């Protein structure tokens, strides 16, 4: 199954616009991803992709490769300027922490 189809079937993405030709991340999944990001930041410094991967891994209706889905979602959200609170608050510090790990 194509990653876009898997994300749409799982309710992570939805078709919008006229004639329903635009994909967007559902508000329900965004809320789930933001809650996942908040929980994970208490434990460690995580980048956007790892937060999205964890959110997909804990999303009940998504039973596919979370790594592939997270990569696709990160690009989709970044292109549309929708990363919001999923983006690390201090990106330079995040890169430093990842390099040190």
Image: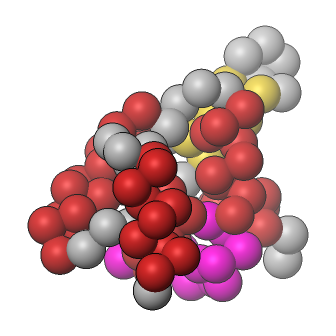
Rendered location of residue 99, percent (x, y)? 53, 76
Residue 61 visible, this angle: no
Q: Residue at x 83, y 27 (%)?
A: 21
Occupied quadrant, residue 46: bottom left
Residue 80 visible, this angle: yes
Which quarter shows the C terminus?
bottom left
Q: Please give left or right for residue 21 compared with residue 16 in the image.
A: right
Q: Please give left or right for residue 25 compared with residue 57 in the image.
A: right
Q: Please give left or right for residue 37 compared with residue 77 in the image.
A: left
Q: Residue at x 49, y 74 (%)?
A: 98
- Compared with 98, 36 (above or below) is above
Of residue 15 and residue 41, the one placed in the foreground of this image is 41
Q: Residue furthest left?
A: 42
Residue 52 included in the magenta stretch of the image: no
Q: Residue at x 72, y 47 (%)?
A: 75
Residue 59 included in the magenta stretch of the image: yes
Q: Residue furthest top?
A: 18
Magenta span: helix, strand or loop, mainly? loop
Q: Which residues are magenta?
A: 58-70
Which quarter shows the N terminus?
bottom right
- Compared with 43, 45 (above or below) is above
- Compared with 18, 50 (above or below) is below
Rendered location of residue 64, percent (x, y)? 64, 83
Rendered location of residue 19, percent (x, y)? 83, 18
Question: Looking at the image, what colour scheme do you see?
Answer: secondary structure
Q: Residue at x 64, y 78 (%)?
A: 67
Rendered location of residue 59, percent (x, y)? 40, 71
Q: Please give left or right for residue 97 compared with residue 11 in the image.
A: left
For the image shown, how many numbered marks are present on the structure? 0
């Amino acid at each position: 199954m194509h990653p876009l189809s898997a994300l749409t079937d799982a309710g992570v993405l939805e078709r919008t616009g006229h004639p329903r030709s635009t994909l967007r991340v559902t508000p329900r999944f965004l809320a789930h991803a933001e809650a996942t990001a908040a929980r994970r930041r208490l434990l460690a410094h995580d980048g956007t992709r790892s937060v999205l991967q964890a959110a997909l891994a804990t999303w009940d209706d998504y039973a596919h490769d979370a790594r592939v889905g997270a990569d696709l979602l990160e690009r989709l959200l970044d292109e549309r300027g929708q990363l919001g609170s999923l983006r690390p608050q201090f990106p330079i510090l995040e890169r430093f922490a990842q390099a040190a790990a």
